[in-house]
Amino acid sequence: MEFFETTILVLQSTIRLSVPLIFAALAGLYSERSGVFDIGLEGKMLAGAFAGAAIASLYESAMFGLLGAVIVSMGFALIHAFASITQRGNQIVSGVAINFIAAGATVILGQAWFRQGGRTPSLSSDAKFNAIELPFAAELADVPIIGPIYSDLLSGHFALTYLAFALVPFTWWVLFRTRFGLRLRAVGENPAAVDTAGISVIWLRYRAVLCCGALCGFAGAYLSMAISAGFGKNMTAGSGFIALAALIFAKWKPVNVMLACLLFGFLNAMEIRLQGKELPLIGEIPIQFMQALPYILTVILLAGFIGKAIPPKAGGVPYVKER
Amino acid sequence: MNNFAIELQKINKSFGPVHANKDIDLKVSKGTIHGIIGENGAGKSTLMSILYGFYHADSGNILIDGNAITIKDSNAAIAAGIGMVHQHFMLVENFSILENIILGAEGGQLLNSGIANARSELKRLSDEYGLDVDPDAIIEDVPIGVQQRVEILKTLYRGADILILDEPTGVLTPAEADQLFEILELLKQQGKTIILITHKLREIMAITDDVSVMRRGEMVATRTTKDTNVEELAELMVGRRVLLQVEKGPADPKDVVLKVENLNVRDGRGVPMVKDVSFEVRAGEIVGIAGVAGNGQSELMECITGIEHAESGRIILNGEPIGVTGGSTPSDMRDRGMAHVPEDRHHMGLVLPFEESENSILGIHQRPEYNKGIFLDIENIRKDANEKIEKYDIRPPNNRLKTANFSGGNQQKIVIAREIETNPEVLIVGQPTRGVDVGAIEFIHRRIIEMRDAGKAILLISVELDEIRSLADRVLVMFDGKIVGERTPETEEGAFGLLMAGIEDSDNSTSNPEQSTAQNGEAG
Amino acid sequence: MAAPYAKLPKWVDFGLIPVINILVAFLISGLVVWLADESPLQAAGLLIKGAFGYGEGIGYTLFYATSFVFTGLSVAIAIHCGLFNIGSEGQAYIGGIGVALACLAFDSTLPWFLVFPIAIVGAAIFGALWAFIPAYLQAKRGSHIVITTIMFNFIAASLMIYLLVDVFKPDGTMAPQTRGFAEGGQLPRLDWLFGIFGIRTGAAPLNISFLLALMAAFVVWVIIWRTRLGYEIRTRGFSPTAAKYAGINETRVIIITMMISGGLAGMMALNPIMGDQHQMQLDFVAGAGFVGIAVALMGRNHPAGIIPAAILFGVLYQGGAEISFEMPNISRDMIVIIQGLVILFAGALENMFRPFIVMFFAGLQKSNSSSAIEAGE
């Protein structure tokens, strides 16, 4: 029974840890599927996290905070869009720039406005997202097996958590069942085909990049307003890059994205769990190895040793109308 | 006046100093197939791009069905009932045929109903025009001919009444081309108006009702097809320019220097591009390979020069076999006395941001005369470059100037100078005068003849038949990856045209074996 | 469409446009300072004073610049080969292992001038090896080098924590760092050199690796523009197809270039480890690898541009420290913003102002030629 309880606990933290990854990786999916590479997920998440916590603390409202997170993150996305779509600049360079600007600006502005060493004030429970009890969670808690699964594992998460998981089928639906999705996929593969079909490549890509910004805002809000009650310096701690790795690992497919994020979240949960513990047969695994595992796995995938990750064909290349 | 589907009045378009379209007038009658011919760069594609809203004319009017309209983008063109089949297909390769067809005409925010409609509509169009396709097949899995059908279906699905086809047969096999013509005929009978852009006279004569000829940005004539003939059109197309008649004496072929046997090459996607090709080139002769672009010439050339590897076959250079299926590199080939003027100087032959002197050693940069240990011998490289600049009259005579700032002709001279000055045994030349001004053309041609007279073996690959005929001593014609025939350069143009279109005419081919056996006898 | 690429005088292309881009980056940084309720002008003044106002400031400025020269060169040489190496940070970090091993092994037996060359080689080898894997994967298996080098930065960070905590840390201590080096593992400072010019660098850790950085810049210039290898690197960088045509072995060039790039990044580790802290500490790179990206972009990938760009960032680091003393609202994170803005405007948006400048010069020429005609009449 202890094994079962431990499993529930690990899976619970897996879900908790994978939610920001899912938001951010889906964000990257919209952008990269449209042909705009984005290594600035981290920066947009950070900006969103800061804006969300700052606004929520000012207005004592989680909703205002979320809105702020989304708008600010979209603002950063707009910079990326302007640089890489309108100005046809280098998308990688632009992404790197956004990461730095966000990393610096959140701390400077946070310190100037709140004077707490770059932190935003602690959010009261009204100003943050709180865990939701699913119906009958309390009643079912004592039922063996099903009880813990339902009450402990599935219930008691934030609204944003459920939203993240709902976004997976939604994104699939958008991508494969709507006009926008069809065009988005097309523009990432062959923008000239989209252009000659009378559709604006630029506007389409702008919309995709803005979707990316919005979802990064959600990811940021989750970090600063759900699992924490405020913004802390560099609180994303590289999860934007893990999300990027998950996106590649998932070969740019929505359901795979969720699975990859859960895998990376699980590794993270195990790493916390296993810290300093001896495993039978293997001995102690250095936690640093567990931390690096998502990146190692992604490199192995990129090297083509476990399937091949083929990015959207027009990815990273600015569209120039030519004949 | 209402029986014109399209009327263009005084269309002008310039790109910087290049006047691509000058005062173009064009009238296309409803329900006809109207051909537009002209050489590469005559301005055909620019004109059609204006009609399809890709470019905006600097001045002039466009009338569709007698109504003046402005076509500000492709959407406006589509709305006006114009559909275009581009030379390079505008398809999303990993999409199904159905998805490609509805792209841009989805019929609503959600795909479901649109797809269902498209499926039935596609069935109707398929039946009506004999355009049979499997709607769920993925584009990258179907043959080129089917991809083109999808492009036509795309325009019909959008309700196009006017179809523009840009060089539609360039990528097709002859059988596919015939099928296409049947389809076009059927479309015409259904009242569609078709504009066919091509540089192939045969197609014009075979299928069009009217034909307009463009030359250097101008519309020089419009004829009713049945009242004109190939000779007249050809003359209108090229104008009264000085015929490229290069002075040259008869060839004096000696030993076989380059021998290609049963060569097979696939391209990056695994499509066979060169199929079982065999031929030989002797010292002191120019062998030309003619053919429409895209029939395997580029792959053949890249394989011979060691850039790409073959799947099977042999190449023998100076009596020694080359590791053609792996192992041979461009440097090896150069070391063994081969020089290569590539067909695409912008991407292969030159590094455009380099100084002139840096490009004058590209590919031979590892030779001892340009190096001092691990360092480049800059002084010698520049001295050497200056000598070539003088000898080949490269202008401006500045070896520090960025190569991108030279004119096309002078850029090509940089390449020619570099390759010829290595004093090769075999010279492989691709499209030596593409985008080169008349003066430089003459100069380059003379150099190639001089090389021949100096006893070098030369393989000339060009899509300009004129050029091949005026330079080569023997002409091989390549079609669909195969050498489909050998002719003397004096052979009539029409006969070449047929061969290049993959049509074997039995009359002339009888003379061919004699010729080659005679040569084999000589070799033995 | 043609306008942004129209020809401009060389000094505009290589001088005016980069300067305008950088100025805009600084103007926006000023805006952030103002948003943080401080005076941008006063901040600029403090910056200059902190960086140049006294000898020790100059010493610190050049100390920081030393690291940035190495990483800037690292990023630049890869760009010449058409490769975007975001991994200089991780390569510098791993390069530290080479420095630490050399110092730990020989610091009490050999004098610094013998340990230094061993450490240089060690730093370069470890940095190069860390760059080798992404390079190999790019050249042989087509894995996107941007992504793999990002991944390798994180892998390096985890690896180094493990090594410092579980391997290098002396028993009985808590801090994740090596033991302090004896005299053989300490590079001499350059106070004597600057003393000649009457500049007292005081406690600034400016050390002899500054001279090594200048030498490295010269060597990189020689490699890129004067050797056969450099010729092949630039050919592949400008045009992979032309490189193929020229018989250049792409795999070899990619791998060698990346190893040089990684080696240069690795040598950055000499400066903080042997020159300043005299031990290897956690996170000693402190973002210098990323600053290298900004430095390379700003210096237009030319050593002659990279040195002033590195010094400019040295100014920001040193002067920024000064500002953060005086202005409570401005911490050194301000530099990170400036760095990002420089990357944005000198990199991704480098052609944004071009059309305006072309228009300006076209207008200038027109008025010139028309006035010439008038004069002629």
Image (cartoon, coloured by chain):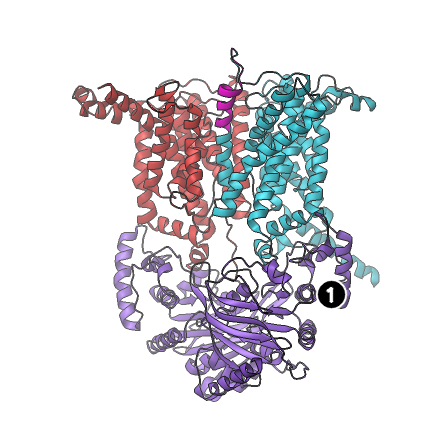
Question: At which x and y percent is residue B512?
Answer: 50, 84
Question: At 29% across and 59% down in the image, what residue appears?
Answer: B136
| B140 relative position to B220: left or right | left
Picture colour for chain C: cyan
Residue A137 visible from this viewpoint: yes
**Image quarter (top left, top right, bottom left or bottom right) of the N terminus of chain A:** top left
Q: Quadrant of residue C103?
A: top right
| A97 relative position to C199: left or right | left
Question: At which x and y percent is residue A147?
Answer: 19, 23
Question: At which x and y percent is residue B483?
Answer: 48, 75
Q: Is residue C267 above or below residue C135?
A: above
Q: Is residue B432 above or below residue C336?
A: below
- The type of residue carrying mark 1 is Ile
Q: Nearer the viewer, residue C258 or A249?
A: C258
| A226 relative position to A112: left or right | left
Q: Residue C234: say if magenta.
A: no
Q: Is residue B415 above or below residue B130?
A: above
Crowding around mark 1 (Cα neighbors within 10 Å: few <14, some 14 to 19, many 20+) is many
Picture colour for chain B: purple
Q: Which residue is mark 1?
A: B394
Q: Is residue A159 above or below residue B321?
A: above
Question: At 66% across and 28% down in the image, what residue appears?
Answer: C118
The secondary structure type at the circle numbered 1 is loop
Q: Residue C170: say if magenta.
A: yes
Highlighted magenta segment, given as a residue range: C157-172
Picture colour for chain A: red
